[in-house]
Structures are given as C-alpha cells and as structure tokens.
Amino acid sequence: MAKLKIGALPDDKPVKVTIELPASVHRDLVAYAEAVARESGQRTDPERLIAPMLLRFMATDRGFARIRRAAHSPRGGGGGEG
C-alpha cells in the first residue's frame, strides 16, 4: 500500500476557519480521509485533514521557506519579532 503524507492527526486546540471548497476538492478530501482510515485504522473527518495538509504543504514549499528566512533575518527587512 502507498505511504500517505498525512497519517494520524495530533490532538491540537483548533482555531475556527470557515472556507468554501470546490466540490471536486471536497470529494478528494473525503477519499483521502477514507484512505487514511484504511491505513491507520482511525476514522478521520475530512475537515480535520485540511490543517495537516496545509502544514505539510507550507513546510515543503522552498519558496515560502526562503521568504520566511528573509523576513526573520536581521537584513531581511521583516522588522518583526521572530
């Protein structure tokens, strides 16, 4: 069986965000939740996959990592606390 990028979900205090998804994205999210359930034996609501997917996406986006490093560097002009 293929190794999924999203596995068991951590129990973390959520922040409520309301979004609208295209129907095709929601169908894929439901299918992914079903795949996670088969692989982990843990039933997961599709909505709970969104945060780990976004986290994984941002963690592996090299362009975003460069922007964050530049914003947090003394020369980066971010001006904020790190």
Image (tube, helix red, strand yellow):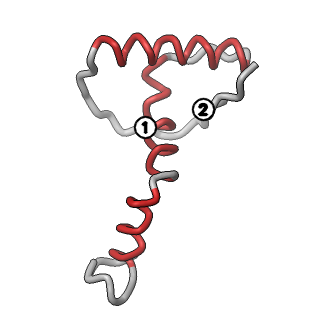
Give the left or right position of residue 4, taking residue 22 as reference: right
Mark-to-mark CA distance, 2 and 1 = 17 Å
Say few, some or many: other residues with alpha carbon within 10 Å of mark 2 (under 14 / 14 to 19 / 20 or more).
some
* Residue at x 55%, y 16% (from the top left corner): 33
Q: Residue at x 51, y 51 (%)?
A: 60
Please provide percent x and percent y for residue 64.
39, 59
Which residue has dot 1 on it? 14
Which residue matches tag 2? 6
Left-right relation of 19 to 46: left
Could you tell me which quadrant the C terminus lies in?
bottom left
Residue 46 is situated, as x and y percent measured from the top left of the image, at: 47, 18
- Mark 2 and mark 1 in contact? Answer it, CB < 8 Å: no
Whether residue 11 sits left or right of residue 22 in the image: it is right
Q: Secondary structure at mark 1?
A: loop
Q: Nearer the viewer, residue 16 or 66?
A: 66
- Nearer to the camera, 25 or 33: 25
Percent x, y of residue 15: 36, 39
Which residue is found at the position 44% from the left and 50% from the top? 58
Quadrant, the N terminus: top right
- Nearer the observer: mark 2 or 1; the answer is 2
Amino acid type for the residue under numbered disc 2: Ile
Q: Is residue 9 above or below residue 46?
A: below
Q: Is residue 16 above or below residue 45?
A: below
Residue found at the far right of this picture: 1
Answer with mark 2 or mark 1, whichever residue precedes in sequence: 2
Q: What is the secondary structure assignment of the residue under circle 2?
A: loop
